[in-house]
Structures are given as C-alpha cells and as structure tokens.
Image: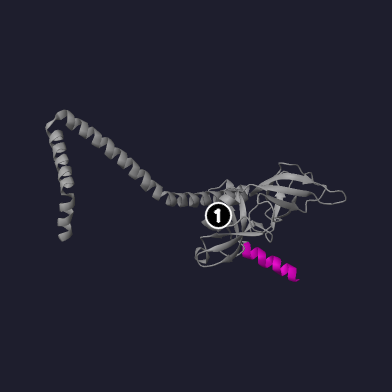
Amino acid sequence: MRNLVLLFLRFGHFILFILLEIFCLYLIVNYNRKQRDIWANSANIFWGYSSEKWNDWTNYLSLQDKMDELALENAKLKEKLINYELSPIVEKDTLQTLNQQYELLSAKVASNTTDRPNNYLTINKGIKDGVRKDMGVISENGIVGIIREVRNDYAAVNSLLHRRTFISAMIKRTGAFGELKWVGTNPQIVNLGSIEKHNIVAVGDTIVTSGYSTHFPPGLMIGTIASTELPSGNNFHNIKVRLSNDFGTLRYVEIVKNRKQTQQLELEKEIKEK
C-alpha cells in the first residue's frame, strides 16, 4: 500500500491527466455523431488489422505441423507410385489391393553434415517406428543414403557423401549399371564406376537406382552425368555424376521399408556360403 501511495504522489499529476484525456475522449465520441463514426471506423480498422496479424502469427506457429502433414502425405503418395510401377500389368488393371513390396515412412532431419570425408544424417525415427539398419533413405529429389545405426527414437544415416556408401546405379537410357561412390571432395559430385567401355555414355544422361540391392527400388533419381572420359588403355569409363539432391538443404526424408529385404538377404547369404 505504501508503494502505491508513493506512486500516486510521484506520478499523480500524470495519471490524472491521462484519466481526464480518456474521459474527454469518451464525451467527444459519445455525444458527437461524426466523431463517433470516425471512432467506430478506426476501431474496426484496428481490430481487423490486429486480427489479421494474430491469424498470421498462429498460422506461423502451426506451420511446422502442416509441413509434417505434407511430408507424410508426400511419402504415402510416393509409396503408392513406387509399388504401382513395380506391380504386374494384370494387377494394375484390377481393383485389387496391390501386394506392396515397399513402404515409405516420413522423417525429419535432426542433424546433417556435408563437409567431412564421411558424412551422415540423424533422423527423428527409430526402432519404435519400425526402422531397422540397412534401410534406404530418399527425399523428393532423389536418394539420400543408408541407415547404419538405430536407436529407439532416432537413426543415423550414412549419406551418399560417405566413402563407405556404395550404391548400385544405372544409366537410365542404356540400362548399363555400375557402382556409385563418393571420393570425398565435391558434395555435389560422385563417381560412377564399372561401366565398361563398350557402353555409350553421354553428358546429361540420367542416373537412377538399378534395383540390384535391397536398399532401394529401381528407377529412383540419383543425378545426371556431369562429365565422362575413357582413359587410354582402360576398359571402364571415368564418369562423374552431379547429384540431384542438395544435401545442404535436406529437411524431410522418407525411409524405404523393403518388406522382402530379409528374405532376399537370407537367400543371398545361403548362396555365398555354399
């Protein structure tokens, strides 16, 4: 109470002035039609502007949820497209549910590196979401990498910009396939090896996944040939591929769940042991 009294003693004249101004404004607006109309109009403009800004702010706060929903929807649409393209023609002409081999799970990138010899990503999906080691990871612009470690809520992904990431890739135009790997220099360029010299290779050719692995379905975008040469006395082309993905801007990815992966790996293991 003492502080309140001191406040009025110190600022009493100013407070009285403000109260009188408010009272005068009330009298002017209440007893003058023109001023009342001006006040009403100004108030409508103010509250309309305030409401608009409030809506903008609330929309901004909910933007993350909307982005997550779009990422999930995009993953489901891409999943249907991949399985549709891999299904038999007879099955495409029926209304039966497709026997889907691949399932896509949307995930958010929690951390990412691009400036190291061996780069990786951390994504916010893990064991509790059905994520397992050796699953492929893609984005809307192409393949991203392969999952190497999984915890309950997160997974670590060896990106294409990792020296121990090897991807089976092929030239879309010719079907010639080889091994894609990064040499640890330019984050936009990887090498495509094992393409024999009798294959015709041209700058601009599209490079896609071959499907000869359990990580990715065939036909997923990887990039385009940036340069190619055939050194004298060499049986293989020296091909550099410009990646379609910009790894420095990755925000959302999709995890590729191959439902037949375990079966294929077990069969291949049996064959190697014989």
10 Å crowding of disc 1: few (<14), some (14-19), many (20+): many
In-front residue for pair 268/58: 58
**Residue 43 seen in the current view:** yes
Does the magenta run of residues contain 266? yes
In-front residue for pair 25/184: 25
Region in magenta = 261-274
In-front residue for pair 15/274: 15
- Check the picture and name the quadrant holding the N terminus: bottom left
The residue under the point 55% across, 54% down is 254
Main SS of the magenta part reads: helix
Image side of residue 39 versus residue 69, left or right: left
What x and y, as percent, mark residue 239?
A: 75, 48
Q: How is the image coloured?
A: one colour
Asked where in the image residue 173 lies, by quadrant, the reply is top right
**Residue 83 seen in the current view:** no
Q: Is residue 130 above or below residue 142?
A: below
What x and y, as percent, mark residue 37?
A: 19, 31
The residue under the point 58% across, 63% down is 156
Residue underneath mark 1: 254
What x and y, as percent, mark residue 264?
A: 66, 63
Q: Which residue in the rendered view is the most extreme toward the front?
A: 10
- Check the picture and name the quadrant holding the C terminus: bottom right
SS for dot 1: strand
Disc 1 marks a residue whose amino acid type is: Glu
Does the magenta run of residues contain 205? no
Q: Which residue in the rendered view is the most extreme toward the bottom?
A: 273
